[in-house]
Image: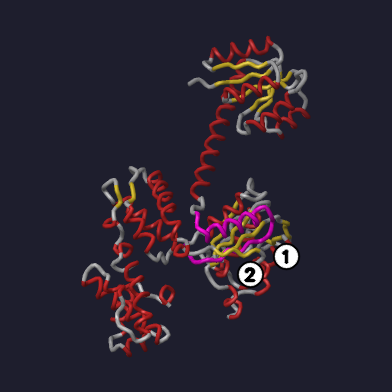
């Protein structure tokens, strides 16, 4: 298909001249004699770029350009004028024009500008597609009441500049929530800078966050701009914020209070305009009591706390999540789309998902790649998810533990197991959980009480996926 070039000029001779130049080079020419006519063509025919005269009666070129930006912000526009001035050029550039041509023009000059405009169009289209793909990647999926509570908090917090503290277990999607806040804030057009405070060595995190001057320490061969400076006018996301050292916490507190940073090796302060979103999977109030986290920093971060629920508290969202993730994985790995059997959904909804959405994604990715058929069945799921060491034992353990603790016999839970092996596993798991609870999860004491070597007890805990975090 030929690229379509729109020429908006009130002089018919100029339009005819440009028509000959463009059609000779196999472009499709579209002409308009005024700004309003050009806007109508843009809405109707979606040209690939436009050449726009500045001096026109009625709506002039600059006014037309401003209106074009409201209709189609990515359309490349080059300005043409026989009376061009520096002021016009500057104003046109501010309005988004990518080039400025003066009359009389040559064929070569016009064709170079058109080629450049089409390159701009392609780049802008790629950027738009990448942005849409990125938004899809970080889309929050679900309709549960627990998730709606989070999204309502995000809706209220996003338009402000207030600091947000995201709380929740590992893998629940705190980064997705942070990106959603940024994407719906007045800073959406600026940078979103993510810092994983737990992944950066303590001796480097200050340099990463605040930057350093050349020669400020051994190995500082070049000046480095810190993450706070990079996020100026945008948003910085401090993930795993509880893992920062006391010294780094003090410096982050200063940024929050003063909105300024100081690079390592420099005495000069630099003003920054940064919105901070922090996240942690730890209990910061307990960390404060242990002397591991500054109380004043906690109060600065905890302006708008948002608790992101674990997946087990929003099980009704799992079918939507599975469909979304399966579709994305098919695209990412160039796989033929697979249908997920209804029984698989039932198993996935019953499983505990200690690793939350991250664990669900990993399990699905393995299944989507390794399953040879067009339908994902229960037998395709990982063993721990299918039930041998996962949901069935967990459900049976909960059913068994309470009556056993009260002195009763085995309830119907294990008796409903499909096989003798499943019954034995469920009963043994429930017994071990009960004894561990009675002994406050002291492994040595529990092993002594049930008369088994400690090494054997550890093997059983691993076999059945027993932990205080899950079963305590």
Instruction: Tell me residue 368's x, y (percent).
Output: 33, 50
The stretch of residues the image draws in magenta is 143-171
Q: Quadrant of residue 121?
A: top right
Instruction: Tell me residue 152's x, y (percent).
Output: 60, 56
Question: Contact (CB < 8 A) between labels 2 and 1?
Answer: no
149 in magenta: yes
The circle drawn on residue 34 is: none
The local crowd at label 2, few if under 14, some if 14 to 19, many if 20 or more residues have their Cα within 10 Å, is many
Q: Is residue 204 visible?
A: no
From this viewpoint, which residue is outermost toward the left? Answer: 420
The answer to whether residue 13 is left or right of residue 24 is: right
The answer to whether residue 199 is left or right of residue 15 is: left
Task: Identify the element where label 2 is drawn.
Answer: helix
The local crowd at label 1, few if under 14, some if 14 to 19, many if 20 or more residues have their Cα within 10 Å, is few
The circle drawn on residue 257 is: 1
Q: Earlier in the sequence, mark 2 or mark 1?
A: 2
22 in magenta: no
Residue at coordinates 66% horizontally, 49% vertically from top-left? 187
The circle drawn on residue 249 is: 2
- Give whichever of 326, 431 is nearer the camera: 431
Q: How far apart are the alpha carbons under marks 2 and 1? A: 12 Å
Q: Quick check: 462 above or below 66?
A: below
- Give whichever of 68, 410 is nearer the camera: 410
Residue at coordinates 65% horizontally, 13% vertically from top-left? 15
The answer to whether residue 139 is left or right of residue 414 is: right
Instruction: Tell me residue 259's x, y (percent).
Output: 72, 60
Instruction: Tell me residue 236's x, y (percent).
Output: 62, 57
The answer to whether residue 346 is left or right of residue 131 is: left
Q: Is residue 352 visible?
A: yes
Q: Quick check: 422 above or below 162?
A: below
């Amino acid at each position: 298909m030929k690229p379509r070039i729109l020429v908006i000029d009130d002089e018919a001779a100029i339009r005819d001249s440009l028509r000959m130049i463009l059609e000779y080079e196999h472009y499709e020419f579209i002409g308009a004699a005024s700004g309003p006519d050009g806007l109508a063509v843009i809405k109707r025919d979606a040209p690939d770029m436009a050449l726009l005269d500045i001096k026109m009666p009625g709506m002039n070129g600059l006014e037309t350009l401003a209106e074009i930006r409201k209709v189609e912000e990515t359309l490349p526009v080059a300005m043409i004028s026989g009376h061009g001035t520096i002021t016009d050029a500057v104003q046109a550039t501010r309005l988004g024009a990518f080039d400025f041509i003066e009359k009389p023009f040559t064929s070569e000059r016009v064709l170079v500008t058109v080629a450049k405009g089409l390159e701009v169009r392609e780049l802008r289209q790629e950027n738009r597609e990448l942005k849409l793909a990125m938004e899809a990647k970080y889309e929050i999926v679900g309709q549960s009441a627990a998730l709606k509570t989070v999204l309502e908090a995000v809706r209220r917090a996003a338009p402000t500049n207030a600091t947000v503290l995201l709380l929740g277990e590992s893998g629940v999607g705190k980064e997705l929530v942070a990106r959603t806040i940024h994407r719906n804030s007045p800073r959406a057009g600026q940078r979103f800078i993510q810092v994983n405070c737990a992944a950066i060595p303590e001796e480097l995190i200050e340099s990463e966050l605040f930057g350093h001057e050349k020669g400020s320490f051994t190995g500082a061969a070049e000046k480095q701009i810190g993450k706070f400076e990079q996020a100026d006018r945008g948003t910085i996301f401090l993930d795993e914020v509880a893992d920062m050292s006391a010294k780094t916490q003090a410096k982050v507190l200063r940024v929050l209070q003063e909105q300024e940073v100081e690079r390592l090796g420099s005495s000069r302060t630099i003003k920054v305009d940064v919105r901070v979103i922090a996240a942690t999977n730890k209990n910061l109030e307990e960390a404060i009591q242990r002397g591991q986290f500054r109380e004043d920093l906690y109060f600065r971060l905890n302006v708008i706390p948002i608790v992101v629920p674990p997946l087990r508290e929003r099980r009704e969202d799992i079918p939507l999540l599975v469909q979304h993730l399966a579709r994305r994985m098919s695209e990412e790995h160039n796989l033929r789309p697979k249908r997920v059997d209804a029984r698989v959904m039932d198993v996935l909804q019953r499983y505990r998902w200690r690793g939350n959405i991250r664990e669900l994604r990993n399990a699905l990715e393995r299944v989507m790649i390794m399953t040879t058929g067009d339908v994902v069945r229960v037998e395709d799921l990982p063993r721990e998810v299918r039930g041998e060491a996962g949901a069935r034992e967990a459900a049976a353990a909960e059913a068994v533990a309470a009556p056993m603790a009260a002195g009763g016999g085995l309830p119907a839970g294990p008796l409903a197991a499909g096989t003798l092996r499943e019954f034995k596993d469920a009963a043994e798991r429930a017994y071990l959980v009960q004894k561990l609870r009675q002994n406050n999860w002291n492994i040595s004491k529990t092993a002594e009480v049930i008369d088994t070597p400690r090494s054997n007890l550890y093997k059983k805990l691993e076999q059945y996926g027993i932990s205080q975090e899950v079963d305590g």
